[in-house]
Amino acid sequence: GAVVSQHPSWVICKSGTSVKIECRSLDFQATTMFWYRQFPKQSLMLMATSNEGSKATYEQGVEKDKFLINHASLTLSTLTVTSAHPEDSSFYICSANPIAGAYEQYFGPGTRLTVT
Amino acid sequence: AQSVTQLDSHVSVSEGTPVLLRCNYSSSYSPSLFWYVQHPNKGLQLLLKYTSAATLVKGINGFEAEFKKSETSFHLTKPSAHMSDAAEYFCVVSDTGRRALTFGSGTRLQVQP
């Protein structure tokens, strides 16, 4: 149980275009989902917290107009990288918190974005 | 504010020998602490968690960790390393208010045959 999927797993896009990444909790409902970014050989950095039915909370330094987050249902959150640039190339990972009051999170396999 | 410090960026052990991955934390509250493992091209997997119950926590694949408040440590151990344990390990602390996780910088475990 507690499986999180991400789609796509790998995407290449041209500079200036937008890319949408989906995060789904497959066998549980998640009121809260999180988006992280991981650079090569580095740790995960929290980008934003996504609550179902409300606006996402962005971490300091994360551009909310560039990284659009939508959490329209209890099993789906999306991250859209708008007007992508090569510096946006990274590994994007989502996680979901399945039970209110518990602190563990279940992670998706990640999406590798390459902007050319 | 909360943070975790993983004291070793890289640890190399021989198969069958003990593993020790060190982690120190800083938290204003009673923390929830986790260890996650990341294998290449795979998602993060929860190894174990501490949430103010027993201080010695047993996880999957023979790993365990001991919460020591006096030392603000949460070191990960395993009695005997296996080749399949080679991966990146992250010590993580939870912000009890937001449930957001703060990751350590990671320790790459290498297991030599």
Image: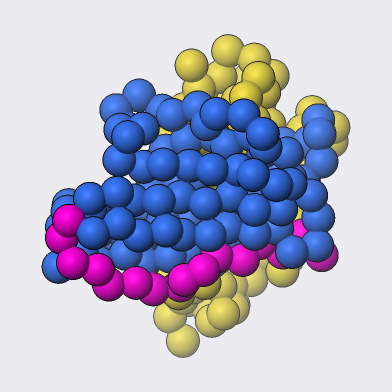
Chain colours: A blue, B yellow
State the image coordinates of residue A8 (x, y, percent, origin top left): 47, 71
Let me know if residue A15 is in the magenta part: yes
Residue B109 seen: no
Query: What residue appears at the point 51 percent right and 68 percent down from the top-left corner?
Result: A7
State the image coordinates of residue A74 (x, y, percent, origin top left): 74, 46
Position above or below: A37 against A63: below
Question: Does residue B32 appear to the left or right of B91 in the view shown?
Answer: right
State the image coordinates of residue B97 (x, y, percent, origin top left): 65, 19
Q: Residue furthest top?
A: B28
Residue B7 location, quadrant: top left
Q: Residue furthest bottom?
A: B113
Along the viewing direction, whichever of B69 and B39 lies nearer the viewer: B39
Q: Which residues are magenta?
A: A1-16
- How many marks on residues? 0
Residue A97 seen: yes
Question: Does residue A102 appear to the left or right of B34 in the view shown?
Answer: right
Residue A32 location, quadrant: top right
State the image coordinates of residue B99 (x, y, percent, origin top left): 64, 30
Query: What residue appears at the point 72 percent right and 69 percent down from the top-left corner?
Result: B61
Along the viewing direction, whichever of B5 and A32 lies nearer the viewer: A32
Query: What residue appears at the point 40 percent right and 51 percent down from the top-left corner?
Result: A80
Let me know if residue A25 is in the magenta part: no
Query: What residue appears at the point 32 percent right and 34 percent down from the top-left corner?
Result: A65
